Image (tube, helix red, strand yellow):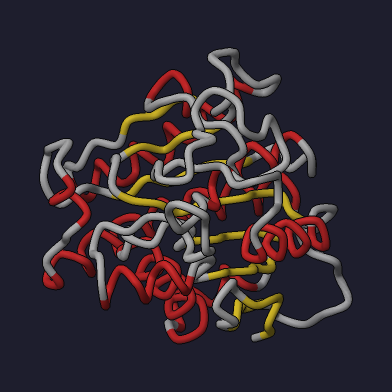
Amino acid sequence: MEDFGVSYERRRLVLLKIVNFGRIIKPLIFIEAGIHAREWVAPAQALFIIHQLLEVPDNKELIEKVDWIVIPLVNPDGYEYSHSVDRMWRKNRAKGKTCDGVDLNRNFDFHWSQHGSSDYECSSTYAGVSAFSEPESLALSAVIKRYASRTKLYLSIHTAEQCILFPWGYTMEVAENDLELRQLASLVARKVYNISKVEYKVGTSAQTLNIVSGSSRDWAYGVCNISLAFTIELEAHLNTRHCDRFIMPPRKINKVVSEMFEGIKVFYTFIKDKYSVH
């Protein structure tokens, strides 16, 4: 475990590096969660992955051929605020002139502040005064860059749109390796459906959900050249556009994260088979 920065309110930003030490340089899977404060199940998913990798003997294979970096909580200030003050808070807690907070997933320096974000401080998708204006997004970008040459899979975990998404978010155009991205996302969605009967949509962010500019996932793909980059939007509590979809009963959380972990293992198998030294 190591600190990779501090938040606006000086909380620690922490990553866990899970490796089985050896002489071989292995491919790396990079996972970040909790960039949006109200999406509580996303950090729970990251913590479940950590637990499965470290504590469950049956998953020992998952760290033999692949290294992992997991960041459970990119936005600790907003997460705390969503617990103590405003359950539906989304942004970080940076002080503004009119309203507080920046949407960290609109603050990355890739098509920053274009369609799919806002330049209005009080908007929930406010992109900030400049790209990487926020300590959380800047710190995350630095650690992504540090490991980019080894990172073969980038996952950004969110809730609660029930989708597996891939580039692009900023445009309706598709990425160069769209077929590979689409096929892998479909394999993951099919695995989750087979064990849960929960159907995850698959597609580009812009075509499937909405246009998003300045996102961490597009930046990892477009700037750091991580060719397999996905956003996992976990299952919603309710099939509704209402904010209640974010408020999942505790009894259901384990079901959701354990089902998606089976999908994570599909990602792992693909990376192992494609990139591992045998």
How far across and how far down the image is residue 33, in percent? 48, 61
Residue 268 visible to the viewer: yes
Q: Nearer the viewer, residue 111 or 101?
A: 101
Q: Which quadrant holds residue 34? A: bottom left
Q: Nearer the viewer, residue 118 or 12?
A: 118
What's the residue at 60%, 21% (across, down)? 178
Image position of 268 with respect to 55: above or below: above
In this view, the residue farthest toward the right is 23
Q: How many marks?
A: 0
Q: Nearer the viewer, residue 61 or 230?
A: 230
How far across and how far down the image is residue 126, in percent? 49, 42
State left or right for residue 99 relative to residue 117. Answer: left
In this view, the residue farthest toward the top is 173
What's the residue at 67%, 62% (across, down)? 140
Q: Which quadrant holds residue 4? A: bottom right
What's the residue at 42%, 67% (across, down)? 78
State left or right for residue 52 relative to residue 174. Answer: left
How far across and how far down the image is residue 40, in percent? 31, 65
Q: Nearer the viewer, residue 12 or 192?
A: 12
Q: The C terminus appears in which quarter of the rendering?
A: bottom right
Q: The N terminus appears in which quarter of the rendering?
A: bottom right
What's the residue at 45%, 86% (across, down)? 55
Residue 184 visible to the viewer: no
How far across and how far down the image is residue 127, in percent? 56, 42
Image position of 25 with respect to 121: above or below: below
